[in-house]
Each structure stands twice: as structure tokens, then as C-alpha cells.
Amino acid sequence: MSEAAGGAAEGGTVAAPSLPARRLGALPEWYASRQPILLAVLVLGIVAVPQTSLVLQRLVQNEPQAGPVTLLVWGLYALPLLAAILTVDYFEREPWWLIALAAAWGGLIATGLALPANDAVQSILTTSQGVNVAAQLGAAIAGPTDEELLKGLGVVVCTLLARRRMRSPVDGFILGAVVGLGFQVVEDVVYTANVMAAGQDPWSAIWQMLLLRGIMGGLWSHAVYTGLFGLGLGYALTRPQWSMAARVLAAVAGLAAAWSLHFLWNSPLLVDSTDWRLVVVKGLPALLLLLALLHRAQRADSAVFLPALAAVGNPLVATDAEIAALRDRRSRRRARAAARARGGWRAARAVRHLQRAQADLAVALATGDQVGIARAREELAQARHELGQLPQHPPVVGRTIGTWSIVLGLAGLFVPVVGVAAVVVALLGLAYGRAEAARQPGARVTPRLWVGLALGVLAVALFVVALSR
């Protein structure tokens, strides 16, 4: 009998060797590695979303005409702010599903959880400190504490679900600002509904809330607060050379800045003022702080990707001067202004196209995205052709009119008559593009025209269906 067998006989039964846990083969790796997070999001959604949807449902039921208009007004209000937020990350644009998740967290989950949480804090303050203290400081304590933690949790969840997308502090700002914007828009809807429920004329309530919360307070509200936290979290996650204490301090500083600025806005200071003092004292500092930090973070963002572009060493891909111009928004703008001075608006648009293609190529090279590399090289060749630096490359015609058709098509989803204009513009562009392509061998028509045509047709179809009902 062997020694091992003897040991087994003396000790009785022997535990079976542990086997690695088996995972269902049908589950993709991405889902399997993030399953606990997704389940937590599902549970929080089940708890929070009914709270938010109940408020929105009551608004539409109580105000059959003004209610849908309120949702439409605040939805349209959010579009330019969202576009401005997304343009901050010039190099690597976030995937649509991540942006949608961040907006949904802010607008549905964080809002739904904040409604009862704020009421609970107000009740605690009333019981412990009295009615007067709760009336003066309740909003200043409850709002920043509950809302910033809940919105910040959404940024953390989005980061955990897309860890590879967090490559620079700017990525953290984008996620934080989108979460904050979603929260801000739904909160504005809730405030508008409360004013209507208090007996004010619905149409004047919409205008008043749009003026006070949209214009006077919208530029330095939740998108700025949570964007600051996301920026701090981005520094903490993308600076492995920093000590752990410094990285934790960056995230805590972002949360502290968000809480402090939110507290300042909700504080009794200038609470009865609706003039420029409210903007200068309580709003402008938050925006200026964010812009200063963002300028620094954007330069750090370019340092992540531009070395890969410089390593190519091909002046037809990017010269040293063109790489230097990509560093920040100001230098890119100066390069386009110089091109406009030399060759007019057409040259400026070509340089913009070239910069966009070079930035996309830098990201694709840094991340090893072969499909992205091929696509960016094609766009880069098109831009060189527009600048007259690559005359033999076949052009893509109809880009500008194609972009306009897409813009009109998106607007047509809200204003049906604009959808008709999108169809007309797209058809004219296709006719012009086909004629141009027939005269230039190898030329092709931009697919943007087909996208604009599809959006226009969809807008018109939805309008026809609404009329038929």
C-alpha cells in the first residue's frame, strides 16, 4: 500500500479535490463577470422606478394637455446640454448604451430613491432640531447628502460595468455629468408638476420653471455637481502612479466639491433673490471651477492617445504641428482659424474633418481597434483629399447636406412638419450626390443622406399614424 493510500485509510474518508465552479456556457463573459452589479441595478430599479413613474403618471393624468408639453419641453431642454457634455471628450466618445444607462440612473433610479430619502431627512431634522431649522436648512442638508450619494453611486456602477472605458479623468466627467443631467431634468419635471398641483396656471408654471430652474440654475446644477465627482473618480482610477492615499483623496475631493456647491445653492443665502446676484454668488463659482479642472483634464486626455499617433511617423497621417494642434480645444480652434484665413470656410471644414479623423485614429491605435483603424484611415484620406493633399483619392459627396438631413430628421420626431423638410433635403442630396459621383470615378454618396431620409420618413409616418387615431 502506498503512503498516500495508507494515510487515507488511517484518516477515514478523504475530501474530494475541489473543482473550479462551472459557469453556464450560454452566458457571455461580459455578463458573467458583472452579474452581481447588474442584479443590484435591477433590484434598485424595481424599488426606485415606480416612485419616479408615479409622479410622471400623475402629471399626465392631472394635466392632459400641459403634462405632455412639460415632458416635451424639458426633454428638448436636455438635448443641447447633453450634446455639450459629450463634446467635452474629443478623443474617445462613450458608447450609446453607457450614456443611456447613466441618464436612466440619474433620471429614474437616483430620482426615485431621492424622493423618499429627502422626506426622511426632513422628518429627522424636524423631530430633532425643530420646524424652523428644518424649514431653513432642510433642503440644504437633505438634497446634497442624499442626492449626491445616489448620483455618485450611479457613476460608480457605470464605471464598474465599463471598466475599459475609463481611460482618463474626462471619461469620469462624462459619466457624472450625464447622470446629473438625467436627475436634473426629471427633478425639473417634478418641480413643475408640484407648482401645477399647487394651483398655478399650468402654462405659466412651465415658463416660470423653465426660467428659474432651466436658465438661471440649469448651467450649474446637478450635471456640474456630479460631473465634479466623476472627474475626481476618473483621476483616482486612471492614475496608477499616484499613491493610494492621493487617489482616494481625489475621489473624496470630487464628492466634497459636489456636496459643498449643492449645499451653497440650496442654502438660505439669497433665497428670495432672482437676479444676477443669485447667479454670481451661488452658481458661477461651480461652473468656473469645473471649467478650470476640465481644461487640465482634457490636456491629460490628449496625452493618453497622441503618443500612438506620433509613433506612426508619417506626415500624411499627422505632422508634428497637427499633433500639437490636437492637444486641446483652443489649439484645434486656432488651426481651423488659420485654415479659414488661407482658404475660406471650405478649408476650415476640411481641417475639422482631418482633426476628427486623426483623433479617431489615435484612439484606435492606442486601443488596438483594427476596424477603427481602417475606418479612421479612410476618413483621414478623405480629409486630405478635401485639402488638396491627396488628389487621387475618390471623394465622398453630400456630407454637409447629409448632416442637415439628419438634424432635420431628429427635429421632425418632435415637430412633424420638419420631418417633411428632412425628406426633401435628403432626396435632393441623394440626387446631387449621385450626379456628382457619376462625374468622378470612384466617388460615393455619403450614407448620412440615407439616415436623414429614414429619420424624416419615420417622423412623417408617426404623424400620419397619430392623425389616423
Image (cartoon, rainbow, N blue to C red):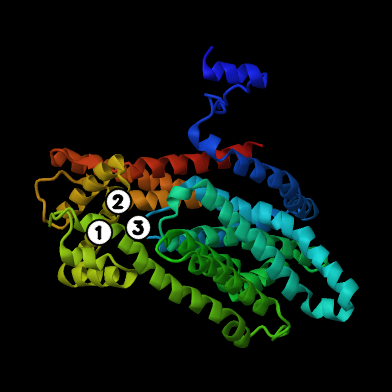
Name the residue that disc number 3 marks. Answer: 91
* Mark 3, other Cα within 10 Å: few <14 / some 14–19 / many ≥20: many
Q: Earlier in the sequence, mark 1 or mark 3?
A: 3
Could you tell me the amino acid type at mark 3? Phe
Q: Quadrant of residue 254?
A: bottom right
In which quadrant will I find the C terminus?
top right
Labelled disc at residue 233: none
| Badge 2 or badge 3: first in the primary sequence | 3
Q: Which mark is residue 366?
A: 2
Q: Residue at x 56, y 56 (%)?
A: 155
Mark 2 surroundings within 10 Å by alpha-carbon count, few (fewer than 14), some (14 through 19), many (20 or more): some
Q: Quadrant of residue 240?
A: bottom left
The secondary structure type at the circle numbered 2 is helix
Front residue of 467/142: it is 142
| Side (left or right) of 131 relative to 44 | right
Amino acid found under the numbered disc labelled 1: Pro
The residue that appears at 46% across and 46% down in the rendered structure is: 420
Identify which amino acid the numbered label 2 is placed on: Ala
Cβ atoms at labels 1 and 3 below 8 Å apart:
no
Task: Judge by depth and name the residue closer to the eye, 179 or 229.
Answer: 229
Element on which disc 1 rests: helix
The x and y percentages for residue 219 are: 55, 72
**Mark 1: few/some/many CA within 10 Å (<14, 14-19, 20+):** some
C-alpha separation, residue under disc 1 versus residue under disc 2: 8 Å
Q: Nearer the viewer, residue 134 or 376?
A: 134
| Circles 1 and 2 in contact, beta carbons < 8 Å | yes
Q: On residue 307, which mark appears?
A: 1
